[in-house]
Image: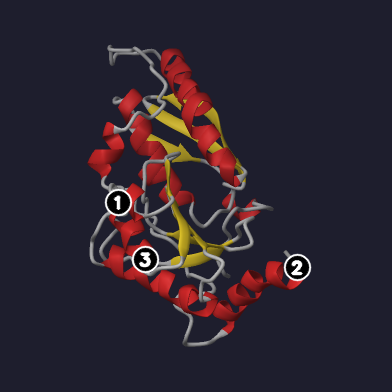
Amino acid sequence: MNSATLLKPLRRLFAAGSKAGKASVPAAPPGFPADASVAPAAPAKDAPLLLQHAWAPEPNALKLQVNRLLLPLGDKRKYADAAQATESPLAQALFALGALDSVEIDSAFVTVLMGADADWDALMQRVPEAIRAHLEAGKPAVNLSAVSAAPRPKYKFGFQQTERTPEEQFKIVQQLLDAEINPAVAQHGGHFTLLEVKENRVFVELGGGCQGCGMVDVTLRQGVEQRMREVLPEMAALIDVTDHAGGTNPYYQESK
């Protein structure tokens, strides 16, 4: 593959972000919902759906970040064609556009690989439009009943009692961070540090790509907090004490 072919998707990416009034994906989203009461795949009604281009290593890839939790934290689904995507209405809608080699969906990203004969200009516009139309219509990215039925590695804690000492609670939360949460956020260069568990409140500090990241509230409230309540139902609050203003390498940085 020559250098012109390798640079082609980058040129398309920057062109899509520079056409004022015509780009389907905002070049600089104003932010993401921070409402702690928001449930997965159901953001606050007044929070607009936002899409943001993200870097992908494949030269023929188009990767988009979505301010929605599309799958449980750490989950990922990849489909080679529509026949494999029976559990994913979003992937089927994207394959219907034609000229796609694969569709990958994880907790907050959608990545498509374009075929060798794809019309790059058309797909750079049509893929974001299809994602936006699908999610704004209230349709799921993936059928969650199918996802929950599929085998998924999850740490088995084995605790039944809810009257626990702070030391026991600390151990449970640390096990969850080590087994599930940190391996998931490490994919984006981030990590969680457990500082203290006091009066059923869990205090954490975020580092790496999570410090100052514009997606931190989506990750923390729609993913980590819900999973933490499964293993520690008595938890009164998950408190983030991170100085996000001091983040030097956020995975996704909001515009100022």
Number of the front mark, 1 or 3: 3
Can residue 110 be seen here? The reply is no
Horizontal and vertical percent position of residue 236:
32, 32
Q: Is residue 7 left or right of residue 75?
A: right
State which tag comes first along the sequence, 1 or 2: 2
At mark 2, the secondary structure is loop
Can residue 169 be seen here? The reply is yes
Query: In this figure, which residue is indicated by the disc labeled 1?
Result: 38
Q: Report the amino acid beneath label 3.
A: Ile
Residue 67 lies in quadrant: bottom left
Mark 2 crowd level (few <14, some 14–19, many ≥20, 10 Å Cα): few
Query: In this figure, which residue is indicated by the disc labeled 3?
Result: 131
Query: In this figure, which residue is indicated by the disc labeled 2?
Result: 2
- Asked whether the residues under the numbered discs 2 and 3 touch, taking CB atoms below 8 Å apart as contact, a structural biologist would say no
At mark 1, the secondary structure is loop
Mark 3 crowd level (few <14, some 14–19, many ≥20, 10 Å Cα): many
Q: Report the amino acid beneath label 1.
A: Val
State which tag comes first along the sequence, 2 or 3: 2
Residue 24 lies in quadrant: bottom left
